[in-house]
Image (cartoon, helix red, strand yellow):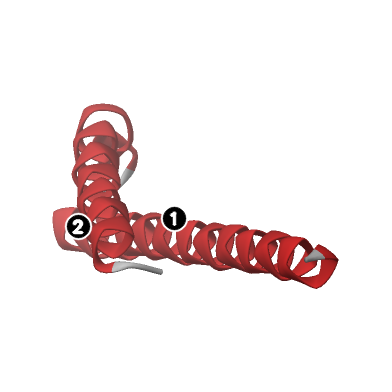
Amino acid sequence: MTFSQAWDAGFKAILIYVGVVFGWLIFSERLFENQSVSVAVMNVVAAICAVAFFVRRRRYCIAERRAAEAEVASILAEI
């Protein structure tokens, strides 16, 4: 994973975190009687979503790089 790919994935993970927080505050906040419990659960859910996106994106970039390296190796083997 290159720096630019990590930067892009990290920024999108932050946007996912913020989006989950806003969605939580709009749709799920009223389902909890205790606000502090709601905030704690909201942060856990948002963090899990953001980290899961980053990990998934990292795995995708690694697989993409391996495929490109295999293609280059096969081209060089033909020469």
Give the image location of residue 3, x and y in percent.
25, 67
The residue furthest top is 26
- Quadrant of the rendered image containing residue 48: bottom left
**Residue that numbered label 2 is attached to:** 39
Q: Nearer the viewer, mark 2 or mark 1?
A: 1
Out of 47 and 26, give the one closest to the viewer. Answer: 47
- The residue depicted at 24 percent of the width and 37 percent of the height is 19
**Residue that numbered label 1 is attached to:** 53
The residue furthest right is 78
- Give the amino acid type for the residue marked by disc 1 in the picture: Phe
Out of 11 and 63, give the one closest to the viewer. Answer: 63
- Quadrant of the rendered image containing residue 72: bottom right
**Number of residues whose C-alpha sits closer than 10 Å to that of mark 1, classed few (under 14), some (14–19) or many (20 or more):** some
**Number of residues whose C-alpha sits closer than 10 Å to that of mark 2, classed few (under 14), some (14–19) or many (20 or more):** some
Q: Which mark is residue 18?
A: none
- The residue depicted at 22 percent of the width and 28 percent of the height is 26
Out of 75 and 60, give the one closest to the viewer. Answer: 75
Left/right of residue 61 with respect to residue 37 in the rendered view: right
Give the image location of residue 13, x and y in percent.
29, 53
- The residue depicted at 44 percent of the width and 55 percent of the height is 53
Secondary element type, mark 1: helix
Proximity of marks 2 and 1: CB atoms separated by less than 8 Å: no
Which quadrant is home to the N terminus? bottom left
Left/right of residue 55 with respect to residue 5 in the rendered view: right
Sequence-wise, which precedes: disc 2 or disc 1? 2
